Image (cartoon, coloured by chain):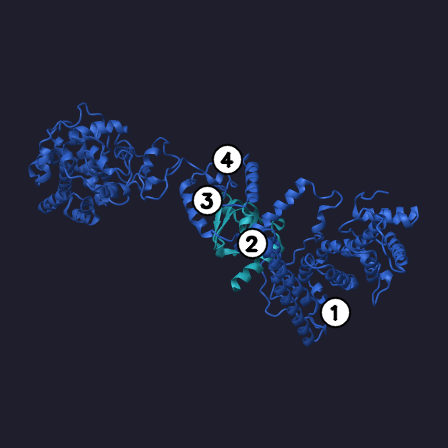
Amino acid sequence: MWLSLVGKDVVVELKNDLSICGTLHSVDQYLNIKLTDISVTDPEKYPHMLSVKNCFIRGSVVRYVQLPADEVDTQLLQDAARKEAMQQKQ
Amino acid sequence: MSDSEQGQETEDVSQRQWPENGEQWSDGEDEADMDCGLQAMAEEDEEIDLHNDETFGMDLDANETTGEPRNGLLQFKEPPSPPPLCPPSPIPTSVSKPAAPPSSHCTSPPHRQRPHFLPQVPPGQRGRGRGKRGGLRGDQMFEDPAVMRIVEGRPSLKWMARSYRKTRGIPRSILQDNAIVCVIDGHGGRGHHMTSNFLGLPYPVSSFRGRRGAPRGPYNKRVFTPRGPSQMHTSMMPGSPILSRQPLTPRQHYNQTGAFPFPLSRPCPSTPQSLNPKMMQLRFGTNSPRPSPVYSPSSNPVQHLRYPGPVTQLHPQHKRLLSQKKHASQRKPQGWDPYCNLMTAKEKEWITRLQMIQLQTVSPYLEDYYYQEYYRRIEAKLAEEELGIRSKREPPKLTTPYITKTDSYTPVVHIEGSLGQVAVSTCYSPRRAISAVHAVQAQAPLEEQKDTRQQRLEVLSKIEKLFIVLLEVEEAERMKATAVGEAESRLKEKTQRKVENIYSQLKHHDPSDSGGEFLPFLLVSKGKRLVARLLLFLDRESALNILHVVTSNLPTLMSRDTDESLPVLYPPLRTVIGGLTFSQLIGVLKDLTTSESLTTYECLTLACQNKFGLSLLYALLSQGERLLSSGVPLEPSIGDFEAWTDTIFQVAGQLSQCSLVEPLLLPSNLLTLFCRYLDKRTVHQLKSNMESATGFLALMS
């Protein structure tokens, strides 16, 4: 699912309440996220991010990742999760 | 001290392994020097010089004529005479002997001149042992004409040592130092052919002490003039009496040089481009790739270098999407990122390859089901669009019937039955502490509520189990295309059994339960989805049964459809309706209009108010019209036509009066149907009413 979202715009909310909007560049097994062309979504109370274009976010500090609704097929995702659960049981 | 050092030097000379030599240059030694004073330092310098001389054939020191004072910075100019004038004979002797005579010979000028330069050591350099020596060193070098010659003709690591000790505290990129460049060139740019290089080098690196490990200081840019390799080689050749010495093993050589160009492996944008090819030659690992010219990944954010490359395998549809995006965004002006090429493209690819190896799978459909399926569906959709299979009439939103709700931000959202709070974006307001016990509705007594919840959970878990079976069925359906003959029939059997199993489980959930068969499942949105997908596999009878259940309980279903998931049932049910006979159709219509608690009127009203209900109604009417107009013998039962016309009138009355919601699909033959039975005025009214609901001029008159 993450692979299908590469290249799409997401908003990552961190545990420190910082929200970063950017294009998803890559994800790895720990859900570390690389974003390109980022901007801080909410009122830019965090001006130290002004010059940053790309960033690498460690997976453990992410609270949420807001995905574009039309890019995610929830039914398909449910099926995939069921299949995975099935495999794990076996 | 000098004796011991000389002795040590002998060892060094004989061993000729520069790591050992390097220890001479350790800081501990420096501290000792400092204690002994400048004189001691000078002596040590002398020893170092001596060793260097012997190693590099510094008997050229004999020609010390130029004694021009310098101001502490190395400034070499072209010596008038060609390189080494001193006879080669002393050199071989210096190899084996402790070289006392040459040392005296060579170092006498320094001795003589050192005192002059002692005071000139910049105070700033006193803090470090090396600095002190360096200060002396540099001045010393100026005095030594042989030194100058050497510099001119043979830039060598030895000079690195000297000038390095000299210059300090000037933070400058090593890459900018021509001296280093020269040395690299001098190695011929062939990192792997050290022995051959070595022969070309009159000053073997064994005596390159002081450069062990990472190079520490910057080099004065003006120390050396850059030389082309050919020039250096030719100029080095005269000094080749050294060749008789035992060369370093390539490995040792490589070790030293490998160490010092380490920071050079990062080509900075400030480095002149021409130097890069030469610097690339030295590598510190067999597998690490060669750097490429400057590349900036950040300038094009969508340019996913990793992915479209040969390393990653994307679904072709995905690739296409990404490349489209890339083309679209490449019009942006490309900015320069000064930190862009810390890793070369090859290095990145290498790492990517490693990561991709971990992701390789033999069964992508199993391990990456979502991705494969998602893009397959997108492809199928596109293909469909291209071929124009869709009929123009049907609006594309057939499969997405949901009404978008206006987003109202509530910081705490609680869903019945969920644990704690549902996650809502908390950036606008701080999260409230999760309440351990949420407010329980006081209406129903606790037991009953538990029971309801229990039942619901049961239903949900059953649905999940059935879903797994359904997924297997769907998988088998997919495999059917590939299966042949016997395997296919076996497969068919299996799937059929599974389907029946699901059906029966849905049917006979709990006889004591309210609502009868199927209903508990249909009330849950997940259950609706399950049934919708199952309907595709069911036989006529079972499908009809389900349709019957749906229509009979339509009011209930509609009222309890909180998350608007009923429309998911519409497409399969429409297919079922499409296969109804006239009598069956009448039966269904009767179900729709008759209910225990409600009158027909109320039923119809409710249906009209609900998207799904209205669509279902339309579908049924449309089917009837189709049957009637098709000319196929209908074989109606008694009273069918009456029921039919009755229904028509009732529906027409309803449709013209109440406000209609937008249906999922508006069949085209409805007006035709109404024209058949009703007068024009009513038809017009109906038409306008229906059109206003749908918002488009859909129907022909």
Chain holding disc 1: B
Q: Using the rendered image, report if marks 3 and 2 lie on a common chain.
A: yes
What colour do you see for chain A?
Answer: cyan
Q: Using the rendered image, report if marks 1 and 4 lie on a common chain.
A: yes
Mark 1 against mark 4, which lies toward the viewer? 1
> Residue B507: image x %, image y %?
70, 67
Q: Nearer the viewer, residue B540 or B23?
A: B540
Q: Which residue is mark 3?
A: B311
Q: Which residue is mark 2?
A: B369
Would you say residue B660 is visible in this rendering? no
Q: Which residue is located at x 66 percent, y 70 percent?
A: B453
Q: Secondary structure at mark 1?
A: loop
Check the image and name the residue furthest to the front.
B486
Quarter of the C terminus of chain B within the rendering:
top right
Q: CA distance from mark 3 to mark 2?
A: 21 Å
Q: Secondary structure at mark 2?
A: helix
Chain holding disc 2: B
Sequence-first disc among 2 and 1: 2
Q: Is residue B349 left or right of residue B107?
A: right
Res. B516 mark? 1
In contact (CB < 8 Å): disc 3 and disc 2:
no
Q: CA distance from mark 2 to mark 4?
A: 37 Å
